Image (cartoon, grey):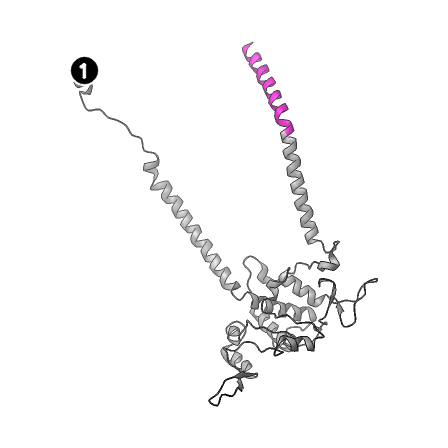
Amino acid sequence: MFSRAAFNSFKHAARGASAKIAPHSVLMGATVATAVGSGAGLLYLNRNAAHANMEAEGLHPANHPFPQKKLLGTFDHASIRRGFLVFKEVCAACHSMDLIYWRNLVDVAYSEEEARAMAAEYQYVDGPDDTGAMFERPGKLTDPMPRPYPNEEAARAANAGALPPDLSLITKARHGGVDYIYALLTGYSDPPPGVEVREGLNYNPYFPGGAMAMAQNIFDGVVEFEDGTPNTASQITKDVVTFLNWAAEPELDERKKIGVKAVLLFSSLTLIALWIKRNRWQTLKTRKIVFNPPKNWANNKSSK
């Protein structure tokens, strides 16, 4: 009888508690579902190529499998070497790289002798000399990459008013990074029906607005690779984008190497700290203070 009464009391209490908690649970579940749905929707819109503001913002680039994008991936240095060749023969006619010096290429894509020889092919203004006059000299490893134009006005005048950006940090200065640059260089096409492109501009759906001043410069066979790599347009673009990515993040390989060392070091220190806490501090964490009265303690206490 007692157990049945206790069971009925517990059942009524559980029903009352569930009646109170149910609205809160429903509200919490709806909130979580809304948050998850909103996040999934934003992720879909972010990854989906076609969206309402495509023309103004540019087509969202696809995710390309560059090895340096992986968690422990590093640069393909052979690709960096080929990419510099593409930059020198194709891109350097309009774009500068003010933050890259010839010495930066040493032990990355070229030997010191090769980099020194390439620098000597260009003439740099130096001085003044003993007479106060400026003079030209062959380039050295300490010189930056040569500029195609002496100043911004000359660059605009040669490109119908458009200013070719410096490419030293271009992969970090554009949303999408290497994926955007790759998609931009390979994304030229004819404008779709209903889209008009002003004369002198070129249609590229990945560029904000869709019309850009730079014409398509990378085609199959535009450069010849010394290592026999196929010189298709996609391979050429991949190599020059890898070079530009290295120019923006030359410390990437070393940073990841240091990161792996740091993870291993701190993991080992964490395990050692846990072992010390468990074994060396065990006596303090589990100690028990006990009073052991001397012999005849009760007799001495009663005599007083």
Q: Nearer the viewer, residue 119 or 112?
A: 119
Where residue 229 sits in the image (x, y, percent)?
64, 73
Q: Quadrant of residue 66?
A: bottom right
Q: Which residue is mark 1?
A: 302
Where residue 82 sits in the image (x, y, percent)?
60, 73
Which region is colored magenta? 1-23
Q: Is residue 263 above or below residue 135?
A: above
Residue 5 falls within the magenta-colored stretch: yes
Rendered residue at 18%/22% (across/down) = 295
Say which quadrant the C terminus sits in.
top left
Q: Is residue 65 visible?
A: no
**Principal secondary structure, stretch drawn in magenta:** helix
Rendered residue at 34%/38% (across/down) = 282
Residue 289 falls within the magenta-colored stretch: no
Within 10 Å of the Cα at label 1, are there few (<14), some (14-19), or many (20+) other Cα atoms? few
Where residue 208 sits in the image (x, y, percent)?
71, 62
The amino acid pointed to by label 1 is Ser
For residue 74, side relative to residue 163 (left or right): left
Q: Nearer the viewer, residue 215 or 82?
A: 215
Say which quadrant the N terminus sits in.
top right
Where residue 103 sits in the image (x, y, percent)?
50, 75
Q: Residue furthest front?
A: 132
Q: Residue furthest bottom?
A: 131
Q: Is residue 200 above or below residue 34?
A: below
Q: Residue furthest top?
A: 1
